[in-house]
Amino acid sequence: MAIFAVAYDLTLPQEYNAFYECLESYPHIHVMDSLWLVQTDCESGDLRDHLLTHIHKGDALFVSRMNQDWAGAGTQCGDWLKATERQWHRAAQASIAK
């Protein structure tokens, strides 16, 4: 598994229930208004493609695999990122094996 940062700009926020439900289907934390961290087995492009089915043309979406070199201030994600179920090392080994 790996941790991904998902950032977005949505043009019609009231019409995105399916997008938010999709994000919530993964182990996740909603870090800031337009930033979520999700844990998944898929690659960044696959996650992006899955999320794209729930947003509109003209919206923006950015997905990036994270590593353990992170820092934050004023967010509540530290405990979530430090939890043993995050499996940082397994994600790194899986990407090297490919």
Image (tube, rainbow, N blue to C red):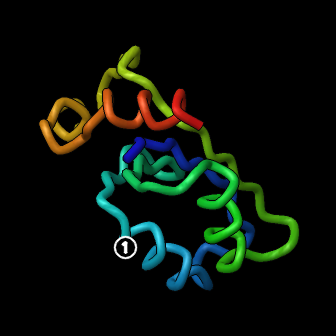
Circle 1 residue: 25
What residue is drawn where x is 18% and y is 30%? 82
Against 42, is 14 above or below? below
Question: Which residue is nearer to you in this view: 37 or 45?
Answer: 45
Q: Nearer the viewer, residue 59 or 63?
A: 63
Q: Is residue 26 left or right of residue 16?
A: left
Position above or below: 85 against 12 = above
Question: Could you tell me which secondary element the residue under label 1 belongs to?
Answer: loop
Q: Position of residue 25 (x, y in %)?
A: 37, 73
Which residue is located at x 78 percent, y 64 percent?
59
> Based on the displayed image, in which of its 4 quarters is residue 23 positioned?
bottom left
**Which residue is at 63% across, 71% downward?**
50
Q: Residue furthest front?
A: 97
Image position of 89 with respect to 43: above or below: above
The quarter of the displayed image where residue 79 is located: top left
Tell me how many marks there are: 1
**Three-letter residue code for mark 1:** Ser
Q: Is residue 41 left or right of residue 44?
A: left
Q: Quadrant of residue 78?
A: top left
Residue 56: x percent and y percent? Answer: 78, 76
Outermost right residue: 58
Residue sitting at x 53%, y 51%: 34
Q: Residues within 10 Å of mark 1 (few under 14, many from 20)?
A: few
Picture coordinates of residue 6, whole percent (x, y):
55, 49
Viewer-side residue, 79 vs 12: 79
Considering the image in quadrants, where does the C terminus appear? Answer: top right
Left or right: 18 in relation to 90: right
Tell me if 8 is positioned left or right of 69 in this view. Answer: right
Q: Position of residue 31 (x, y in %)?
A: 37, 44
